[in-house]
């Protein structure tokens, strides 16, 4: 049996809940409920006036006794906004950068996490709102700079984020040519994640590469999660073969 861990992806909406309350601690509580080993976050504020000027990635990580890696897709003077990875496991930042964007800037974060005899290559992203934009971003993601980059033989790929894309979309279809959809691999009922109060759309996704077995997935739908953000967290129990 290989190493088992739980990966969570969660769009935290700058820690503003559906009740309009700003509360990074509440986001941390939701993640703690998920009992995650690795957490992929989207829509994270760092030093932004609208959210009190704090480093949300660091604040949430501190609540969870984890470390954080953050990449600002949007950077306006001191204010930053983007994606983060949190974990208590050892990490190494491999790369972070932007994706082709027409509207709001989008980016991707690539972090390596040792797991037994394998090295997890964890990618975190948040794709754009326009279909043509998402296709260009996905083509970049599966290209030679990111998922198509040379990797060691013990690499195991995990890919997570808010793709703003459902299964019939062109960008989703591009990704499933390269990776396996964790919810599909797990079998059973496939659940939507957005909007949190009455989920209708499956926008948040976890994908895995070869050498990763998916045992179970779930959308974390609790009263606290429905208030904390406009998205619900998605988690997957994985075995690293």
Image: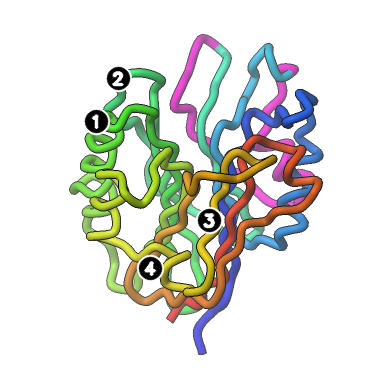
Q: Which residue is mark 2?
A: 102
In magenta segment, residue 54: yes
Residue drawn 52% across the image and 73% down it = 188
Please give the range of residues in magenta.
52-77
Q: Is residue 208 above or below residue 99?
A: below
Q: Which residue is mark 4?
A: 156
Residue 51: quadrant of the picture: top right
Q: Nearer the viewer, residue 45 or 226?
A: 226
Neighbor class of circle 2 (other Cα within 10 Å; few <14, some 14-19, many 20+) is some
Neighbor class of circle 3 (other Cα within 10 Å; few <14, some 14-19, many 20+) is some
Q: Is residue 53 left or right of residue 150?
A: right
Q: Is residue 9 above or below residue 22?
A: below
Q: CA distance from mark 4 to mark 2?
A: 31 Å
Sequence order check: which comes first, mark 2 or mark 1?
2
Of helix, strand and loop, which one carries label 4?
Answer: strand
Question: Which of label 1 and label 4 is nearer to you?
Answer: 1
Q: Nearer the viewer, residue 235 or 194?
A: 194
Instruction: Identify the image's colour scheme: rainbow, by chain, secondary structure or one colour.
Output: rainbow
Q: Which residue is mark 3?
A: 91
Residue drawn 24% across the image and 38% down it = 135
Of helix, strand and loop, which one carries label 3?
Answer: loop
Q: CA distance from mark 1 to mark 4?
A: 29 Å
Question: Which of label 4 and label 2 is nearer to you?
Answer: 2
Q: Are marks 2 and 1 in contact (CB under 8 Å)?
A: yes
Q: What numbered label is drawn on residue 237?
A: none
Q: Which residue is mark 1?
A: 132
Percent x, y of residue 63: 79, 45
In magenta segment, residue 55: yes
Sequence order check: which comes first, mark 1 or mark 4?
1
Q: Residue furthest bottom?
A: 1
Question: Which of label 3 and label 2 is nearer to you?
Answer: 2
């Amino acid at each position: 049996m290989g190493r088992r861990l739980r990966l969570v992806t969660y769009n935290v909406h700058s820690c503003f809940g559906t009740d309009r309350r700003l509360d990074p601690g509440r986001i941390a509580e939701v993640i703690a409920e998920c009992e995650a080993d690795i957490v992929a976050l989207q829509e994270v504020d760092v030093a932004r006036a609208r959210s009190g000027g704090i480093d949300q990635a660091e604040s949430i990580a501190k609540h969870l006794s984890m470390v954080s890696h953050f990449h600002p897709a949007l950077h306006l003077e001191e204010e930053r906004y983007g994606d983060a990875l949190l974990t208590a496991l050892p990490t190494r930042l491999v790369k972070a950068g932007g994706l082709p964007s027409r509207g709001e800037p989008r980016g991707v974060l690539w972090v390596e996490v040792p797991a037994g005899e394998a090295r997890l290559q964890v990618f975190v992203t948040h794709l754009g709102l326009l279909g043509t934009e998402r296709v260009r971003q996905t083509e970049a993601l599966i290209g030679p700079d990111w998922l198509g980059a040379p990797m060691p033989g013990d690499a195991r790929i995990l890919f997570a984020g808010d793709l703003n894309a459902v299964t019939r979309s062109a960008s989703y279809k591009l990704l499933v040519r390269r990776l396996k959809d964790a919810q599909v691999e797990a079998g059973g009922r496939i659940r939507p994640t957005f909007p949190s109060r009455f989920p209708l759309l499956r926008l948040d996704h976890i994908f895995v590469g070869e050498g990763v077995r998916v045992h179970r997935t779930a959308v974390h739908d609790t009263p606290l999660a429905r208030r904390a953000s406009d998205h619900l967290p998605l988690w997957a129990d994985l075995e690293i073969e």
